[in-house]
Image (tube, rainbow, N blue to C red):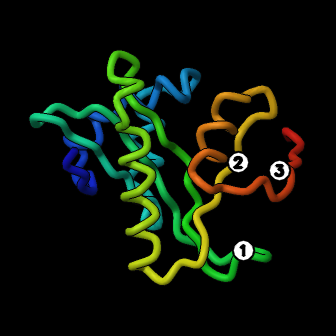
Amino acid sequence: MDVRELTDEAERRRAVPIVRQLWGDADPESVIAWTAEDDYHLFGGFVDSELVGVAGVLLSRHLHHVRHAWLYDLVVDEPERENGYGTALLEFVERWAEENGCEYVALASPLAKHDVHEFYENRAFDRWGYVIEKRL
């Protein structure tokens, strides 16, 4: 898999259908807007020049994580799942984060997503705590 950052709008538009498999309630223009934000990095995984997955990362300093990469979006196109592409994207993000001075890669996941938790735990991620939020 070839992984590279998707920097221009046309590349990010190609990623919208895949991103919306994770965030189905997000309209395409919202996806384009948030993936264009300055601190957000959208990486695309390509197999034979076909986009098969994406990973969206924000570099941050937050609480106990001195400098970390917050993984907001990691999704592989539905027909391409179970081929190791998610692991390849995650390994790319880990290397990229380390090269950018990060001590951690972190993410939040809904409590009910047991398969997602297992995916990350099988790749040496630790459950550290809970994200607690209130919609306003």
Element assignment for label 1? strand
Q: CA distance from mark 1 to mark 3?
A: 13 Å
In the image: residue 135, left or right of residue 71? right
Q: Position of residue 131 (x, y in %)?
A: 83, 50
Circle 3 residue = 131
Where, quadrant-wise, is the C terminus in this rendering?
A: top right
Which sits earlier in the primary sequence, circle 1 or circle 3? 1
Residues 28 and 97: in front is 97
- The answer to whether 99 is drawn above or below residue 55 in the figure is below
Instruction: Categorize mark 2 by other alpha carbons within 10 Å: few (<14), some (14-19), many (20+).
Output: some
Mark drawn on residue 62: 1
Q: Which residue is located at x 69 percent, y 38 percent?
A: 117
Q: Residue 108: which numbered mark, if any?
A: 2
What type is the residue that disc 3 sits on? Answer: Val
Of the 4 image quadrants, the one containing the N terminus is top left
Real-space Cα separation, disc 2 to disc 1, in angstroms: 14 Å
Q: Is residue 72 above or below residue 94?
A: above
From the viewer's perspective, is residue 4 above or below residue 64? above
Asked whether the residues under the numbered discs 3 and 2 touch, taking CB atoms below 8 Å apart as contact, a structural biologist would say: yes
- x, y percent for residue 7: 25, 56
Q: Which of the two discs, 3 and 2, labels the residue nearer the N terminus?
A: 2
Foreground residue among 7 and 83: 83
N-term mark: 2 or 1: 1
